[in-house]
Image (tube, grey):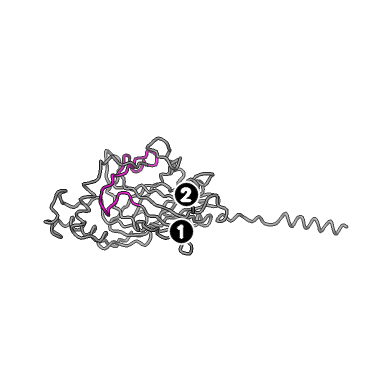
């Protein structure tokens, strides 16, 4: 009888000391897995200092023009396909074509231009928008997008530079998420919370070098418990999740967006809006203008005349500079 009792005590103790098996966060997420993602890039000017955007807002859409190739609003969409992973959606734009910003000062404020609002939209298998799932029920505390340039190379008329592989020399990015996520600061219906709790569903990006091509690796981090670096107690920079952070989470999204920075805001083609293009011979302009025309030609596979038409339409035939509907 004593032996039986001892056996039961041992059995009870062994059962109560079984190791606790942690939940597999990849199988117990509190959100659906996205089946489609659209990244929208909106060319903007600023109504505030770049360094104050996360508190004061300021990005405002530049008006679209009838230009066929140089677009101020661009979208790339990927879909998740069985056996293929993330693939470009049918009819989607393949690359983002952007400008290097000019670094300007306006009444003492740093107002680079252009800058680009970047919106990321996620959809479930039913085609329903699901962004809210990443910012509700505590999910905003364990999710953060990271944006890292990879596979950097010069365009056909660019130069290899020693610091090309330094992400901070290629792009600058600010988290400008709002709460609620689907309202704007400009409307007065939301607060900008991206600085204090970066998620990356909304961001503002500027490109720091022209004549570069690269893949912008977009990753959505899902922390098992947190998205803060446990060694520093802070958020990792937009371009570099730390090794210790990666070990303590998983990726909900990992895909590449091809980017071509084919010209700079500082460039201009010296041609009148009403010029007779039939009389403007190839390479007949000044050296800088000729270079810009050839950049447009090569980027979009256009003739000399078509490239001039594209520039004139993009530059002179947009709407009112303050007429854009999109604000942060």
Residue 47 in the image: above or below residue 301: above
Q: Label 2: few (<14), some or many (≥20) within 10 Å? A: few
Residue 40 is inside the magenta segment:
no
Report x, y in % for residue 3. Answer: 85, 59
Q: Judge from the rendering whether residue 147 lies leftward or rightward of residue 48; answer left or right.
A: right
Report x, y in % for residue 310. Answer: 22, 53
- Name the residue at 27% across, 62% down: 159
Asked whether disc 1 touches disc 2, contact meaning CB atoms under 8 Å apart, the reply is no
Question: Marks 1/2: CA distance?
Answer: 14 Å
Report x, y in % for residue 185. Answer: 39, 38
In this view, the residue in front, 7 or 257, is 257
Q: Judge from the rendering whether residue 281 lies leftward or rightward of residue 121; answer left or right.
A: left
Q: Which residue is mark 2?
A: 128
Q: Judge from the rendering whether residue 273 lies leftward or rightward of residue 109; answer left or right.
A: left
Residue 60 is inside the magenta segment:
yes
Of pointers 1 and 2, the one earlier in the residue sequence: 1
- Name the residue at 57% across, 53% down: 28
Q: Which residue is mark 1?
A: 80
Q: Residue furthest right?
A: 1
- Name the residue at 40% across, 39% down: 184
Q: How many marks do you count on the picture?
A: 2
Q: Residue furthest bottom?
A: 83
Range shown magenta? 45-74
């Amino acid at each position: 009888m004593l032996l039986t009792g001892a056996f039961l005590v041992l059995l009870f103790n062994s059962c109560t000391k079984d190791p606790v098996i942690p939940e597999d966060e990849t199988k117990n997420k509190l959100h659906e897995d996205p089946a489609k993602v659209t990244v929208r890039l909106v060319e903007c000017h600023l109504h505030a200092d770049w360094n104050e955007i996360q508190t004061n807002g300021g990005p405002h859409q530049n008006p679209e023009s009838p230009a066929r190739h140089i677009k101020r609003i661009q979208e790339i969409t990927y879909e998740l396909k069985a056996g293929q992973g993330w693939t470009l959606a049918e009819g989607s734009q393949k690359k983002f074509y952007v400008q290097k910003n000019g670094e300007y000062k306006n009444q003492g404020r740093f107002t680079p231009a252009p800058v680009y609002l970047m919106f990321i939209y996620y959809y479930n298998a039913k085609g329903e928008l699901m962004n809210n799932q990443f910012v509700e029920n505590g999910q905003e505390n364990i999710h953060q997008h990271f944006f890292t340039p990879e596979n950097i190379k010069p365009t056909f008329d660019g130069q290899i530079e020693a610091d090309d592989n330094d992400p901070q020399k290629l792009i600058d990015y600010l988290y400008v998420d709002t709460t609620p996520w689907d309202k704007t600061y400009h409307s007065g219906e939301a607060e900008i919370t991206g600085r204090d709790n970066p998620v990356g569903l909304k961001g503002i990006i500027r490109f720091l070098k022209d004549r570069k091509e690269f893949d912008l690796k977009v990753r959505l981090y899902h922390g098992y418990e947190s998205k803060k670096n446990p060694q520093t107690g802070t958020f990792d920079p937009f371009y570099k999740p730390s090794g210790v952070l990666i070990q303590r989470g998983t990726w909900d999204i990992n895909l590449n967006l091809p980017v071509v920075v084919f010209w700079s805001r500082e460039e201009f083609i010296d041609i009148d809006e009403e010029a007779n293009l039939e009389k403007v011979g190839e390479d007949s302009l000044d050296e800088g203008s000729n270079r810009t025309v050839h950049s447009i030609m090569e980027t979009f596979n256009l003739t000399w005349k078509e490239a001039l038409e594209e520039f004139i339409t993009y530059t002179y035939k947009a709407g009112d500079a303050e007429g854009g509907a999109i604000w942060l």
